[in-house]
Image: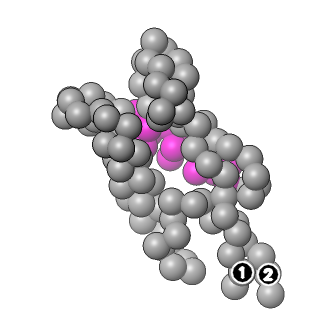
């Protein structure tokens, strides 16, 4: 059996998923994290979702290779810091990949 790595937020995707579905699941994951972290302003949430998804699509999604590494996603402006959301200077740290087998 070949071992594959999947992002932890993509656990509901099943064995196979297109890039668009991965993006949707990441956006849902980010939305939930923002709400859990107390981000309530609709405009702020929308801006962070837009920035986060755009950065995820351009770089982070392509980097999920290690089961132990953490990954960075730009979700806001440089002055944005939130320890609870693991955001430092507008960059959110998300957990590494989980592993699954085919």
Q: Quadrant of residue 26?
A: bottom left
* Of the pair 95 and 16, the residue shown nearer to us: 95
User: Where 12 sits versus 77, above or below?
Assistant: below
* Residue range (magenta): 50-64
User: Where 102 sits versus 46, above or below?
Assistant: below
From the image, tell me which residue sits under label 1.
Answer: 101
Q: Badge 2: how crowded within 10 Å, few (<14), some, or many (20+)?
A: few
Asked if labels 1 and 2 touch by Cβ distance under 8 angstroms, the answer is: yes
Report helix, strand or loop for mark 2.
Answer: loop
* Of the pair 21 and 5, the residue shown nearer to us: 5
Q: Locate residue 63, reporting x and y percent.
A: 68, 49
From the image, tell me which residue sits under label 2.
Answer: 2
**On-image quarter of the C terminus:** bottom right
Please check the rendered image and state whether residue 100 is part of the magenta-colored stretch, yes or no: no
Q: Locate residue 32, reporting x and y percent.
A: 35, 50
Say which residue appears at 74% left-offset and 47% top-offset. 69
Which numbered mark, 2 or 1, is in the foreground of this view? 1
Report helix, strand or loop for mark 1.
Answer: strand
- Please say whether residue 48 is visible from this viewpoint: yes
Q: Is residue 9 left or right of residue 20?
A: right
Please check the rendered image and state whether residue 54 is part of the magenta-colored stretch, yes or no: yes
Q: Locate residue 27, reporting x and y percent.
A: 38, 51
**On-image quarter of the N terminus:** bottom right
């Amino acid at each position: 059996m070949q071992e594959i790595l999947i992002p932890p937020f993509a656990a509901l995707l099943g064995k196979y998923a297109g890039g668009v579905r991965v993006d949707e699941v990441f956006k849902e994951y980010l939305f939930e994290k923002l709400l859990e972290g107390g981000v309530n302003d609709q405009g702020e949430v929308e801006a962070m979702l837009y920035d986060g998804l755009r950065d995820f699509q351009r770089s982070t999604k392509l980097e999920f290779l290690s089961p132990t590494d953490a990954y960075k996603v730009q979700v806001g402006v440089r002055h944005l810091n939130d320890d609870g959301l693991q955001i430092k200077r507008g960059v959110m740290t998300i957990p590494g990949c989980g592993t699954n087998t085919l």
